[in-house]
Amino acid sequence: MNSKILYTVFLACVFGVGCNHKMEKRQASGMFETREVVVSSEISGRVERLEVMEGDYVEAGKVVGLIDTMQLHWLKVQAQQAAVAVNERIPNLDKILEVYRLKVERGEKELARVERLLAGKAATQKQYDDVKAMVDEGRSALEGQTHQAEVMIAGAKAESAAIALKVDQVNDQIRRCLITNPVSGVVLAKYTEEQELAAPVKALYKIGDMKNMYLQVYVEGFQANRLKVGDSVKVFAQLGGGEEREYQGRISWIASDAEFVPKTVHTQDERDNLVYAVKIHVENDGVLRVGMYGDVKFDTL
């Protein structure tokens, strides 16, 4: 009986030491996560096309959908027609002033002729004064018409520029109707179907960069002091059923501020209530999933 008890204690000690040895190698544990982006429409309207399905891999920059642009199209056509009408109203300065310039030129020639006649005493001073008054009047009319025409042209050009700006704004809105995928990754969830109404605050789908996974763990203060960004670590992904796979990871971020131990995190020293979050970058070989558990062995600890 005593030998049986001693044998049981011996097995407990052996397996206990083995477990503690394993825990010493795995200094922290956490769950895998990835960068997730929720994609929304920039314009309100009906979803005419949305070519994404959950599980699809989509490259960054690919146009995957379209919001109805019909109303914006008619606004653009209306603005373009208004621009044509305004441009047709812009007067031709040379044509407007041509009549006044010819009148001034004829008057100046007549004034020069009368001035020669006056010098030869073949014309009176009154004749000269009458012609000069007519020339001065023509010059004044030319200046007035020039100023008025320049004001009209400036106003028409300003109106045309405002309409052109309106066209540019409508073109920008039409461009925003295109739903462009922002990051390369896998579609994690689809929230909207075609022919449904979209709005800037309404999510269309969620995409995640599944090639670059991050394991977030928590370490105690004395451990954080020995770690630095860029350190290589060993990551053991828990695949379930007691199976695990080892990956090479690299520390990408260490929190600068301590926080209280989350309820789901257990530290070796329960008296230490403050821990530091650490993110470890791991390249996914297609096995890792969001929410999967993983353990970490820090090479520097």
Image: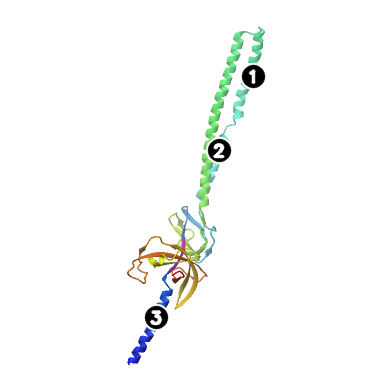
Q: In which quarter of the view is residue 238 placed? A: bottom left
Point out the tag, 1 or 2, that comes first from the N-terminus.
2
Point out the tag, 1 or 3, that comes first from the N-terminus.
3
Q: Which residue is mark 2?
A: 85
The majority secondary structure of the magenta stretch comes to strand
Find residue 210 and report its horizontal and vertical position in percent.
Answer: 50, 66
Callout count: 3
Mark 1 and mark 3: Cα distance apart in space = 119 Å
Point out the tag, 3 or 2, that comes first from the N-terminus.
3
- Whether residue 220 appears in this view of the structure is no
Q: Secondary structure at mark 1?
A: helix
Q: Which residue is mark 3?
A: 17
Q: Which mark is residue 106?
A: 1
Mark 1 and mark 2: Cα distance apart in space = 36 Å
Query: Residue visible at 60% across and 8% down?
Result: 125
The magenta stretch is 31-36
Query: Residue visible at 54% across and 27% down?
Result: 147
Mark 2 packing: few (<14 Cα in 10 Å), some, or many (20+)?
few
Is 241 situated above or below 145?
A: below
Q: Depth check: 210 or 40 in front?
A: 210
Q: Depth check: 101 or 220 in front?
A: 220
Which of the two marks, 3 or 2, is nearer to us in this view? 3
Q: In which quarter of the view is residue 80 placed? A: top right
Mark 3 and mark 2: Cα distance apart in space = 90 Å
